[in-house]
Amino acid sequence: MPDSQDTTLDPRPVLAGAAGASAAAEANSPAVEFRDIDIAYGKFVAVRDFSLSIAKGSFVTLLGPSGCGKTTILRSIAGLVDISGGQIMIGGRRVDDIPIYKRNIGLVFQSYALFPHKNVFDNVAFGLKYRNVPKPEIARKVGRALEMVRLPGSEKKLPSQLSGGQQQRIALARAIVFEPQVLLLDEPLSALDANMREEMRVEIKKIQKETGITAIFVTHDQEEALSMSDRIVVMNAGAMEQIGTPEEVYETPATAFVADFLGKANMLAGTVHGSDRKTAVVVLASGQTINAACPRPLAGGSKVTVVVRPQKLSVGAAASANRLSGRVVSASYLGGSAIYEIDIGGKANLRANAPIAGRVLREGETVDLGFDPEGCVLLDERGQRIS
Ligand SMILES: Nc1ncnc2c1ncn2[C@@H]1O[C@H](COP(=O)(O)OP(=O)(O)OP(=O)(O)O)[C@@H](O)[C@H]1O
Ligand SMILES: [Mg+2]
């Protein structure tokens, strides 16, 4: 298996991507499509029954904990790992029909993987030279790519003369300079410090929009995923757990795993007391009773979990349908808002993230919490959203 970092640097001459006979078929196809793929390393199945269609020009993120198969899926697009079942289509063509060196794919990795002894120009020009692009065009394209990543005029510098963030910009320029069909980004920001990471989030997103390139981004950082993606694929143990817009996966997690992995969630165990088509009355482990929006009637006595995001809890005397009372265990002042940990008498404390009304509450104070029935999601006993 070739080293992953060598993909964009494949020395064999590359023809005009996948253009040609199938151009018409390509025009209307998704940029990338996985059809029921399985990927195994020996006996270990790393990815199972994975299907996903990625629209041209979109920014899709694979999000999930370490080892869930994100990199494996990304590498399968580039042909760096073989699939053991299913099909992958790039631009409407089965990848089996496209030799690896003809797959027109840009890659950016966590480590910048720049050639240390080549200057910026030669690093960025690499993919173009192997595509036999004429020299004047190379100069023009490299210049434009460097402008895009906001490092114009840096052609003569060596990677060692650049900061981490700048090196990652060069890696990005190198990946987009030959206008690939798909841009694959595997945790490209994780080696950067927090400030640089945020800046680069915005920058990558901007470049992706400007170029209209289809981007598949891998991260285990939920904030990164929420802030950058058109759609997020939440992965768990080699399988897709949920796909949706950032709002969808955050506001209506399909499973307990998604609720827990994506941002902070209060997960309150309870038992259904009664319900109709719209609302379930749930008695929480703390003994308090709440109403939760529920799209269908549930049998009395059913065990459920009520998922409430910390931002959905109002702290103080707000007029919400559901009121819980508790005691402040801890308060963290964040500027305009505060995060409170509140003991309502169940096993776990509730977390509330609320704007500050008047003053920051102190430890030990009793407090009323409110939330709307629509502000929560109900999960069944298997941790699946009740729909
Ligand atoms: N070359 C390999 N040989 C055997 N097992 C592998 C190989 N590469 C990955 N795996 C296993 O496959 C699973 C998925 O790995 P993968 O690298 O895709 O995870 P990931 O989601 O990218 O994780 P991380 O966030 O840590 O990068 C893991 O259990 C890993 O140990
Ligand atoms: Mg990985």
Image: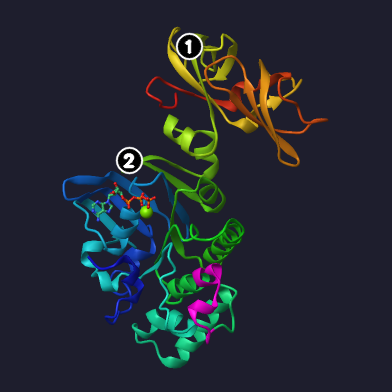
Q: Mark 1 points at which residue?
A: 271
Q: Tell me where the magenta segment starts and ends, as one range.
A: 155-168
Q: Nearer the viewer, residue 243 or 366?
A: 366
Give the number of the disc on residue 237. 2
Residue at image position (50%, 77%) is: 160
Mark closer to the observer (1, 2):
2
- Label 1's element? strand
Quadrant including the C terminus = top left
Quadrant housing residue 316: top right
Query: What amino acid is at disc 2?
Result: Ala
Residue 200's x, y, as percent? 57, 62
**In the displayed structure image, the side of residue 151 where residue 128 appears, left or right:** left
Residue 314's x, y, as percent? 69, 26
- Label 2's element? loop
* Real-space CA distance between mark 1 and mark 2, rounded to the nearest whole angstrom: 29 Å
Whether disc 1's CB lies below 8 Å from ligand 1 is answered no
